[in-house]
Structures are given as C-alpha cells and as structure tokens.
Amino acid sequence: MRTQTQPLLDWVRFCPHCGGSLEDPRNLVNEFSLADSSICFWWCSSCGAKGEIAEIERVTAPELVDR
C-alpha cells in the first residue's frame, strides 16, 4: 500500500495495455491533484495507449448473483 508521502508515480511503472516499462524517457507520466485525489496520466510510446490511474480509498460494488 502506498504511504501519504510516497508519490503515485512510484506505483505507475508499466503500461496496462502492453506491459512495457513506463520508465523509458520517451513515455509520458505525469501526476496531478484534483481536489483530494492524486491522479497519474500516462502515455506509452510503444503501443500508443494512454489513460489515467487514480488513487481511491473505497470501492462499493454490488454482489453478483452466481448462476
């Protein structure tokens, strides 16, 4: 689990799409804050995928029915 003083960038190391390392200087990884949330925008130069990874504290989801 990430500590409050540890940057979110330390946790974003691989592209979720192709698995390539995001530590390559050709990639873009940028952390920013929105209200109380830390969000990390990433772009992978290998596959062209991009997205955001946001830190969340709690997830509420319905329980799915087994069939």
Image (tube, rainbow, N blue to C red):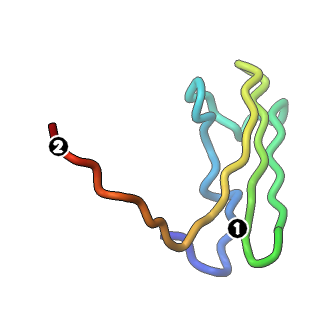
In which quadrant of the rendered view does residue 22 lie? top right
In which quadrant of the rendered view does residue 18 lie? top right
Identify the residue shown where x is 75% and y is 54%. Answer: 40
Q: Which mark is residue 7?
A: 1
Q: Which mark is residue 18?
A: none
Badge 2 amino acid? Asp
Q: Residue 7 location in percent, x, y? A: 70, 67
Under tag 2, what secondary structure?
Answer: loop
Of residues 42 and 56, the one nearer the viewer is 56
Q: Check the image and name the residue furthest to the left.
A: 67
Which badge, 1 or 2, is on the more N-terminal residue?
Answer: 1
Judged left or right of residue 2, residue 26 is right
Of residues 12 and 63, the one nearer the viewer is 63
Q: Is residue 43 above or below residue 33?
A: above
Q: Is residue 45 above or below residue 37?
A: above
How busy is the neighbourhood of tag 2: few (under 14 within 10 Å), some, or many (20 plus)?
A: few
Q: Residue 49 location in percent, x, y? A: 72, 27
Q: Residue 17 location in percent, x, y? A: 59, 27
Identify the residue shown where x is 82% and y is 68%. Answer: 33
Mark 1–mark 2 distance (CA, rounded to whole Å): 39 Å
Of residues 59 and 11, the one nearer the viewer is 59
Identify the residue shown where x is 60% and y is 56%. Answer: 11
Counting every numbered tag in the picture gives 2
Under tag 1, what secondary structure?
Answer: loop
Tag nearer the camera, 1 or 2: 2
Badge 1 amino acid? Pro
Q: Is residue 66 above or below residue 26?
A: below
Q: Residue 25 location in percent, x, y? A: 83, 36
The residue where tag 2 is placed is 66
Judged left or right of residue 44, residue 66 is left
